[in-house]
Amino acid sequence: MPEKYPPFQITAEILNLCAEINRLLGQFEGLKMPVPQPQLRRQSRIKTIFSSLAIEGNRLTEKQVTDLINNRRVIGPQKDILEVKNAIKAYDLIHTYKYSQFGSLLKAHQVMLNGLTEDAGSLRIRNVGIFKGDEVAHLAPKYQLVPKLMGDLFAFLKRRDNLNPLIRSSVSHYELEFIHPFSDGNGRMGRLWQTVILLKYHPLFEYIPVESIVREKQKEYYKILAQADKVGDSTRFIEFMLKVIFQAAREFLANLKPQTETAKTRLKLAGEHFQKNPFSRKDYLAFHKNISTATASRDLLFGVKQKILKRSGARALTIYQF
């Protein structure tokens, strides 16, 4: 593998965007909000699947995708319905994928393209090109080169270096689009694999439908891909995807509704923080900095009465444990 593979530069804009995205993720952590509810995960999954498939011409509406996720009957083109059903299964398995294992990508492709192509889960064995009208928009590398290129890509994904996963995920997305390793489904696999890497970086990405912003900027997405192909370098595409991730994260945080604080919600957050470790009222106050000593005492008493907490010791030496 060439030392500088894949070819890209880390620009000031890339570093700035990474810092801004990390700042947004830090804002969420600073809110001391519980992990978002399953309903938010479901909404994100619907938008993700609808957007990623719509980019490639799937004609089902967001409501129809929602109905399929909810196991309701949908009337529409059978190929489009199967694409959505397969994508639902593929995204349901997202926590089982290992982003640096080539076999894991093949497994995901097998699920995503099952029944849609005869070679689901296998690399292509013919040359392919992407056409825009009568013109070739992208001529993928010859099929004989694909195994070597994929080996190089996954060697890059296995590297234990300090490259920010936000950058690594964007490089992976571009390279899967460029190499075009499969006869079909390369776009949705590139977007899926970026999400797999982002999820490993921060669990909040399960609730942020990055693909919905890609769909909004679809023309620019393909334009930047073409520009990156032309210069043989993914820097512009990385910058574009980081802007997309930043916008998606910012919109997600803007739409979060703060929960009304109660003893129960404060104890839930404290439980996530302290886990099974013993703590004192002083520790509880240090975690919940904006409550009074009296409120902390009431919370802890409520926790003991509800059998959420175990209490030992007395007075100033009292210790609590979830």
Image (cartoon, rainbow, N blue to C red):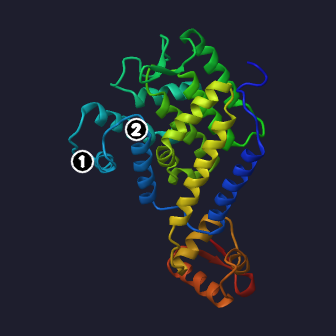
- Residue 98 seen in the figure: no
Where does the image place residue 172, in percent across and percent down from the top left? 62, 32
Q: Quadrant of residue 88?
A: top left
Q: Earlier in the sequence, mark 1 or mark 2?
A: 2
Is residue 261 visible in the rendered structure shown here? yes
The mark lying in front, picked from 1 and 2, is 2
Q: Left of 228 or right of it: where is 82?
A: left
- State whether residue 42 is above or below residue 298: above
Query: Which quadrant of the figure contains the N terminus?
Result: top right
Query: x, y percentage for residue 32?
Result: 62, 69
Mark 1–mark 2 distance (CA, rounded to whole Å): 19 Å
Residue at x 59%, y 69% (from the top left corner): 269
* Circle 2 residues within 10 Å: few <14, some 14–19, many ≥20: many
Residue on which disc 1 sits:
72
Rendered image: mark on residue 53: 2
State the residue at coordinates (54%, 29%). 104
Q: Which quadrant does the C terminus fall into? A: bottom right
Callout 1: few (<14), some (14-19), or many (20+) C-alpha neighbours within 10 Å?
few
Name which residue lies at 47% across and 10% down: 126
Q: Position of residue 28 (x, y in %)?
A: 62, 63
x and y percentages locating residue 246 in the rendered image: 61, 53
As shown in the figure, which amino acid type bears the numbered disc 1?
Answer: Arg
In the image, 147 versus 131, the foreground residue is 131
